[in-house]
Every structure is written in structure tokens, then in C-alpha cells.
Amino acid sequence: MPQERVTFRAMLGFAAVSGDAAERVIVAQLRSADHVGLLRQAMNVFGVFFLWQVFGDHGDATRLTLWTAGLGASMALGLVLRQGRRRRGSVSAADLRIHGFTGLLHGLIWAGCMVALSSDHGAAQLVAHWTLISCIMVCGAISYAPTPLAASGFLLPCVIGLFFMFDRDGQVPLLALATSYALSLLVGCLIYARTFARQHSTSVQLEEKSEVVSLLLREYEQGGSDWLWQTDAARRLSSVSARMAERLGRVPAEVEGVLLVQILAGSAWESGLFPTELHDLAEHLKKRESFSNIVLPVEVEGGTRWWELSASPRYDDAGSFLGFRGVGSDITEQRESADRIAQLARFDPLTGLPNRTHLREVLDRAMADGRSRSGGCAFLMIDLDRFKAVNDTLGHQVGDKLLTQVARRLRHICAGQEFCGRIGGDEFAVVIPQVKENRGIGQLAGMIISGLSAPYQVDEHMLYVGASVGSAIAPQDGSESEALIRSADLALYRAKSEGGGLHCAYEPQLHAVAEERRQLEMALRDALEKEQLHILYQPVVEAQQGRVVGFEALLRWTHPELGPISPVKFIPVAEEARLIGPIGEWVLRTACLEAARWPVPVRIAVNVSAEQLSHPSFVGAVVSALAQSGLDASRLELEVTESLFVNADNGALRILDQLRGLGVMLSLDDFGTGYSSLGYLSRTSFDTIKIDRSFVVGAASGRAESLAIIRAVVTLADSLGITTTAEGVETDCELAMVRRLGCRKIQGYYFGRPMSARDAAELFPPDQVRARA
């Protein structure tokens, strides 16, 4: 609690009183002055009688009478003001100023006495008069000492009066002595007032602190969480509080005089098998040293509670040891809560498996142990295949239940020395504390892939997911845990990129591949801004007449240092880095602007990724590109692949329906190459099906299955009113074959390689091509 200082201006009454402590000091000033006021009044009465005796027969009785009346009036006024202050019951700075006014009035009355009677002084009268005045000043100084304003108001007029009292020749030494005397009284009053204020301020602070301590002790005794305890010099409990006995499930008499350690040990007292915390407590008691926050288990009514104890040794005035006195509290609930928090901090709340932090700790210990012995440890990263499709189609609740079953299977598979946990999402990991080379890792990875790939029954759903595994071994694949995890992650990435359901061990070249991808991603982020990307246009022609009916926009990237970079290489990087969205919008705008120059009804086909269709803003981007270019919606054809239907949710299908509503054409690219299903054609209305080049080449070389596939696709498309486009036609033989099978449109090198916008425009008569805006 900060101490409240009473300033000298506040003691004079020229500053506002702030704070309870300061107000109480001001009250003490006025009360002390009032208590000594009777002495001052008695001295005033005595002085009146004395002056009448000494000067009644020698001076002017009229002046003496008027002075006596003034003194009586000032005394009466002081009494009235004091009574009014007492009735009001509160004080302020104004009360000090009023009290100072009464002191000034009192001093002026006595100064007037010295002026009025100075002409009647004989030697005897002067001595008598000075003797009286000195007594009056002493009594006034004593009574006004706690209030410096009143003391100054009283003594300063008296000092002035002395100049009239000792105004004759030869009285200068007396004047100097009397003035020094009066000023000394004034200085003494001021010093006393400051000391008085400081002492009372300290007393007030001590009183307030005492009240706070008393209040806290009462609250402590009346509360229900902690208790006080003490022992004697033999470390036996003494003056046992009712609360401590209650916490032990006993009455105070049962534990009075029992050793503290024996009470805390419970049933372990006989065996001597004490917990470590109790040994620490006993050591502190033996050494007679203070201790705090020692937490230990205590048996209470057949159960275990956790107590926290603190104490200090006690000594008497002679320095003899009396025992310990301290405080105890039951922290069982806090302890259990802390254990639950620790559980949450180290274990995954959904699956109950160790989490990333716990896995990292185990891996760090395994790597540290491996440095001190032959052989190292291994780290396996596991990623579920096709889990996102479960989440997207059936919801996260089903996905969570699936993850719980996956965790149960993984725990069963890793029942030996392996330590498994969940990293997050659908990623899991396994730490093998000790391996020699890669012995057993492949077998364990195979068991994990096989076990996690078996069907799952979740509610009424039968679910099929797979698993991919990447492994790394310390120390050759990483001497630190972070490096080892990174190596396993790179191996997992390779397993996923090769189709999933595989185990890949780390190889040094994976780092080089990852670094290349990282640099490629960084360069790709700048490519759009620095205009390194451009579009080529490949013609699409009508099969029978060879007339150009459209172009497919093909994105290309030429890096100033790396040169041309294949789309097969940078498109996957763009999709993983979430750059395909802005790049795709740029391609869409640029292609629409160029297509608006071509003759009607020549179309432009633009490839669209599943990620672009996952954002509702894509429809707005298409509308903006059409409006900016002035291209009719029917001349824009958006191409999607069958993979969209495997990974996309219903939101992407709704976006396709909205695009169809705008009049935009839709094309299904690479039909039948990877996820072929006729059901896709019933989920969304397509205008074109593009037959992959692999079927065209196979049919041209006489493969019966390729011919059958093309014939079936054309027949299906014709029945649904869908146009077919054969891709990759490069020879007369291939052209004749696709014409014979009924394909309506053809795309391939036979009619033209991908070309620049200028070359594409030159395929049309000049009068049919609009100038660039």
C-alpha cells in the first residue's frame, strides 16, 4: 500500500485534502489544537486581569476596555467556529484556513495590546508587560503548534507588536532578543507541525495496515481453502486447527502431538517407503530451514489428496527454537486439472494418440540414445489416401470417426517397441527407437499400408481409404530430429506423387528435387508479375471440312535464365502453391480478349482446375472476363478433367451449373483415361467430350480395344447430343480413322501446332479479324 504524504501546503490549508490518510492527519491537527485551546483561553483571561492590575491606574482605561472587549469577542468567535466544525463532523482545507484566521485575530489583538500600552511603560511596567507577552506567545505557540497557519497568524503580528513595545532609545538589544525569541517560537511551531504530520501519517498507515492484516486473517480463518498449522520443537503438531483436522478426516484431538511426518506418511509410516516429496519436507524440518510450495500426496480416508505446504521456523526472544508455523492447502483439483492440461498438451484429443509435440520428444530421446550405441532410430510418416473425399462428401463428423478407427488399427500394428502418434489432419507418424540399417522398416510399412487400407465401417457407410508411408533412418538421413522428419516427409511426398499406397524410403536426391521445386515455386510467383507467362493457341477443326472452329488456350512459361519450362513441370507446382487461381484468371482474361478478335462463332477453350472451381468467386471472374472482352458466353468453352468428380464437392458442381446458366460451354477432357465413369455425364451437362490421344494412336495402329472405346464414346456422345473431339491427330491415317469413327472435331499437330495469337489470327481473312483494343 503506497504511503499518502501530507504536503506542507495541505497542512497550511492552501491545498485540497486527498486521501483518507491525509484527511485523518488534518483532523488530528485540529483536534490537538482544540485540546490545548483551554490553556490558551485560560492564559488570555489571566492576561486581562494582569493588565488591569498593572495598567489600570496608569493608562487610559478606555483603551484597555476596548481591547478587553476585542479579546473577549475573538475568544467567543473561536469557540463558535470550533463548535460548528465539531457539529459538521468533517474537515476540509477551509477548516484549516478558518482556524488560521482565528489565530491571526488572536495575534492581532495581542499586538494591539502592545501598541496601545507602549506609551505607558515605565521600567517596571515594561518588564511586567514583556513577561506577560512572552507567556502569551509561549501558550499560543503551544496551542497552535499542530496548525502552522494559525501559529504563523498568531506569532507574526506579535513580532510586529514588539517593535512598538521596545521603541525607545537603548531598547534595541531588548527588541532583538524579544524578536529572536518570538521567531524561535515560530520556527519551533513549524518544525513541530511537520513532525506531527509525519508521525500521525505513519500512525494512520500502520493502523490501516493493521486493519488490512486483521481483515485478511479473519477472511483466511473463515475461508475454506487453506489452513494454518504449527509444530513444537520436536516436530509434533500443536494447536491443530479444526480445518486441518477436517482435511485429514479426523478431529483435532486425534492428531494433536503426533509427528507431522507421520501424519503425512499415512500407511507408509510403518514401511518407510515415503514419496520423494516427503523426504524433502523431512530434510527441511531437520535442518530447521524455511520451505515453500512443497507438493506431496497425503492419504485421506482411503484416498489420495495432494497438499501444498509452506512454513518457517519460529524462535523466541532468546533465540531458542520453538518449532515451525506454516500454511497448507489442498490442491487436488488444481493438480488434476494440470494433469488434464498436460494430457491435452501431449496427446491428440480425437484419437488419444501422442500428438506432434510428444512424438518430437520421443524422437529426440531416441536420437540421443542412438548416438551412445550402435545403430540408430527410424521415423515413418503416414498419410491417408482419399481421406479428403470422405470429409468432403460425408462430412467431418464421419471423417473424425474414421480417424479414430485408423488410430486404433495403427496402435494395434505398432504394439511392439514402436511409438505411434498423430501429427495432425490425416497424417500419422511412427518412431522406431532402435533399428539396424533399414531392417524391418519395409515390413512394418507394408503392415501399416495393408492394415490401414482394409475397409472401414462407419455408421451405415463402408469406407475405403489407403495409406502412403515415407521413412528415414538416423543418423544417415538426418542427424537432428528436424532433419530426419524432413527426410521422411520428402519420402512420403514421393510415395504420394507415385500414386499412393506405397512405401518410399528416403534417398539423397529427394532433397535436390525438393529444392528444385522450391526454387521453381519462387520463380513462378514472380512469373506473372514480370510477364514471363504467355499463351499459345492450338486450332480445333471441323472433322469433315477441316474448317477452324476454335482454339485451345495453352499456358507456357519462358524463364529468363532457365528457359522454357514444361507445363507438366510447373502446373503441379502452381496447384500445390495455390498459384493456379490467379494464374488461371489471367489466362481466362487474356484468352477472352484474344478470342473477341476472331470471327463469330470461333470458340476459345480454357482449361480450369478443380481448385479454381472450389471458389465461389470463380463465376464472378468468368463474368468479369466476358464483360471486359465483350466475348459472347457461348464462344467460351471451359475444359475440366474427370479428376474433378473424384475430389470436388457439390459446391464445384453447383458452380458448373451456374456457368452453364450463363451460356458458357463445358468440355470433359481426357475422358476415360483415369477415373472413367459414365455417371459423370449424368451429374453435369457437357457440350464436348475430348477423346485422349492414347486411344487415337491405339485405334490407328489397329488395337481393337482402342477402336471399341472410341466407337462407344462417339455413340454415347451422339445419343446425348454431345460433340466429340479427337486429340493428338498427327497423320493422314489417324485423320481418316477418326473421321470414319464419327468424331466431329479434331485437334492435333496435323492441323497445327500451338501458335502465337498473331499466327492464330492469320488463319482467318483479314477483314474478319478485329483490331486489338
Image (cartoon, grey):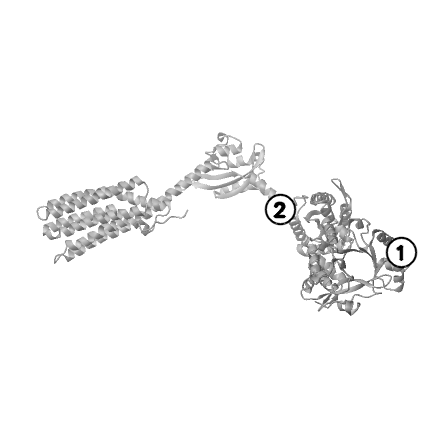
Left or right: 35 as drawn, with respect to 436: left
Q: Which residue is mark 1?
A: 707
The tag on residue 566 is none
For label 1, count other residues whose C-alpha is less than 10 Å away and answer few (under 14), some (14-19) or many (20+): many
Kind of residue at disc 2: Ala
Disc 1 marks a residue whose amino acid type is Leu
Residue 177 appears in the picture as rendered: yes
The disc, 1 or 2, on the residue closer to the chain's N-terminal end is 2
Q: Residue at x 24, y 48 (%)?
A: 103
Q: Is residue 441 left or right of residue 265?
A: right
Residue 473 showing in the rendered view: no
Residue situated in front as seen by the camera: 548 or 491: 548
Q: Quadrant of residue 705?
A: bottom right
Closer to us: 185 or 568: 568
Q: Label 1 vs label 2: CA separation? A: 61 Å
Name the residue that disc number 2 marks. 345
Looking at the image, which residue sits at the far left? 57
Q: Position of residue 357 (x, y in %)?
A: 64, 49
For label 2, the SS is helix
Q: Sort mark 2 into few (<14), some (14-19) or many (20+) by Cα contacts within 10 Å.
A: some
Label total for image: 2
Residue 739: x and y in percent read 88, 60
The spot of residue 320 in percent (x, y) is: 42, 40
The answer to whether 717 appears left or right of 341 in the picture is right
